[in-house]
Image (cartoon, rainbow, N blue to C red):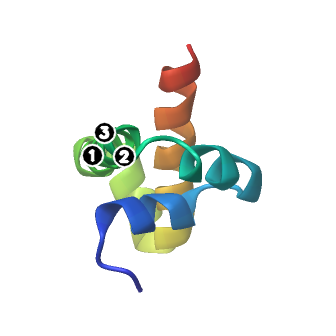
């Protein structure tokens, strides 16, 4: 599993979103990856989901971060 936050964030995205974010500037990718990590750490609901399915928790956090980016 990649250790780089951006790589882990990209892996949590849907293929379509991954392609879009992969084309974004590196500083934007880093900002989104940091927001994604903060979302994972801060949300208790995601903690519970992480115990059941870490990939599902990561995908949900990524979805939320992109939703805020678009909104």
Q: Say which element carries label 3.
A: helix
Is disc 2 in contact with disc 3, using a CB cutoff of under 8 Å?
no
| Secondary structure state at the residue bearing disc 1 | helix
For residue 38, what is the image quadrant?
top left
The residue identified by callout 3 is: 31
Is 27 rendered above or below residue 16? above
Q: What is the C-alpha distance between the residues marked 2 and 1? A: 5 Å
* Image spot of residue 63 (x, y percent): 57, 41
Q: Which residue is mark 1?
A: 34
Residue 50 rendering spot, x and y as whole percentages: 41, 65
Q: Is residue 68 above or below residue 41?
A: above
Quadrant including the C terminus: top right
Residue at horizontal 23%, vertical 42%? 42
Q: Position of residue 48 (x, y in %)?
A: 39, 58
Which is nearer the eye, 20 or 60? 20
Tell me the CA gap for discs 1 and 3: 5 Å
**Is the C-beta separation of discs 1 and 3 under 8 Å?**
yes
Rendered image: mark on residue 36: 2
* Residue placed furthest toward the right: 16
Q: Return the x and y of residue 18 as percentages of the image width and height.
A: 63, 54
Q: In the visual, does 26 lie left or right of 66? A: left
In the rendered structure, the answer to whether residue 49 lies left or right of residue 33 reads right
Q: Quadrant of residue 15?
A: bottom right
Q: Residue furthest top?
A: 71
Which mark is nearer the camera, 2 or 3? Answer: 3
Q: Count neighbours of disc 2 (C-alpha within 10 A) and say few if under 14, some if 14 to 19, many if 20 or more.
A: many
Instruction: State whether residue 17 is above or below residue 28.
Output: below
At label 3, counting other C-alpha atoms closer than 10 Å, the crowd grade (few under 14, some 14-19, many 20 or more) is: few
Quadrant the N terminus occupies: bottom left
Check contact, mark 2 vs mark 1: CB within 8 A.
Answer: yes
């Amino acid at each position: 599993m990649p250790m780089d936050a951006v790589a882990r964030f990209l892996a949590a995205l849907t293929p379509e979103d991954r392609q879009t974010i992969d084309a974004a500037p590196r500083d934007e990718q880093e900002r989104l990856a940091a927001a994604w990590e903060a979302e994972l750490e801060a949300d208790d609901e995601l903690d519970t989901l992480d115990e059941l399915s870490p990939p599902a928790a990561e995908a949900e956090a990524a979805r939320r971060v992109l939703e805020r980016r678009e909104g």
